[in-house]
Amino acid sequence: MAASAKTPALDKPNPAEEWTVVLPRRGKQKRNFHKVIVHERQKQEQVWTPEDVETNPERESKLMQKIQTCIKKLESSSFWLTFLDQLQTPEIFDWFLKAVGSEGKMQMVIYGIGSIESYEPPRLQLSLAILMKRMFSWIGEVEVFDPVISLAESRVLTALSCCVLTVNEQGRRQALRPTMFFMPHCEAELYDNLVDANWRPDLLNNIFLFGNSFEAYEQHLSVCKNLTLADSRKHILAIRQFVKEFGIDSFSDDFFRAFHGSSWHFFNIDPDLDLCGVKP
């Protein structure tokens, strides 16, 4: 998806404004194919509003206190210091510096955060994103989506300077510019949708992904030989050869549930490479 729909007030976007169809000039067949692609994406995306719309100032205040407690807990931990040191090593940090050199800012998109009101791991994950935003001036706007987000959670996220999306993109955001996708412990299908929607060298090279290890997915499937799982991860497996992956360093039990198995993923694809031969 080339653009997101977002509003702190949770107003529904105008469906007529969500898509601009640009048809190629040559070939009737190409034009028809393009229309089909756009139509399929429109079907996959769903305008979203919270199912849980009950909220009040006390509920929102308690949730904000929980998040602030998590931020302080994480900020004072050895995990945060280790994570920060690793992130600033040249082998990782140079990827970001190169990307933001011309852009100035890199947007962060958080998919699949879960319920930050009900569980501590999602709060810790959100806290990590917030601390990164505070630490690095080159991290720009932060957008968040999970279909389980309540109205109270949405309002607290907005108070934390995050934009809550009002369209379920199904992970299919096109990275038209360098974008950090912050997706710890998402379903494999969501990563696969992201890679599929960006199946061009220029788009994939704009993706900076923090989430489940692609290498671990590959190793697991090499052992279990499950065709259903393989199909749900086919784009991840096909693109693995072009991904540079860095697993985050070890951490204490306090943060294991929130971050275990997470890695940084950077795509390094020749701009002239035709990915049609790689497509699963």
Image: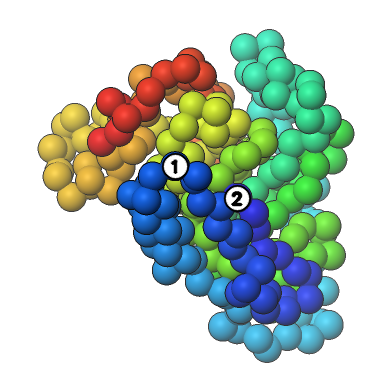
Kind of element beneath mark 1: loop
Which residue lies at the image location 45% right of the left edge and 23% below the top edge? Answer: 243
Residue 218, position as x, y percentages in the image: 29, 30
Kind of element beneath mark 2: loop
Label 1 neighbourhood size at 10 Å, few (<14), some (14-19), many (20+)?
Answer: few
Residue beneath label 2, please? 2
Q: Report the quarter where the C terminus lies.
A: top left
Residue beneath label 1, please? 26
Q: Does 177 appear above or below 91?
A: below
Which residue lies at the image location 33% right of the left edge and 49% below the top edge? Answer: 29
Quarter where residue 52 is shown: bottom right
Residue 185, position as x, y percentages in the image: 47, 47
Residue 106, position as x, y percentages in the image: 74, 36
Check disc 2 and give the amino acid type.
Ala
Quarter where residue 35 is shown: bottom left
Check disc 1 and give the amino acid type.
Arg
In the image, taking residue 260 as reference, residue 228 lies left or right, namely left
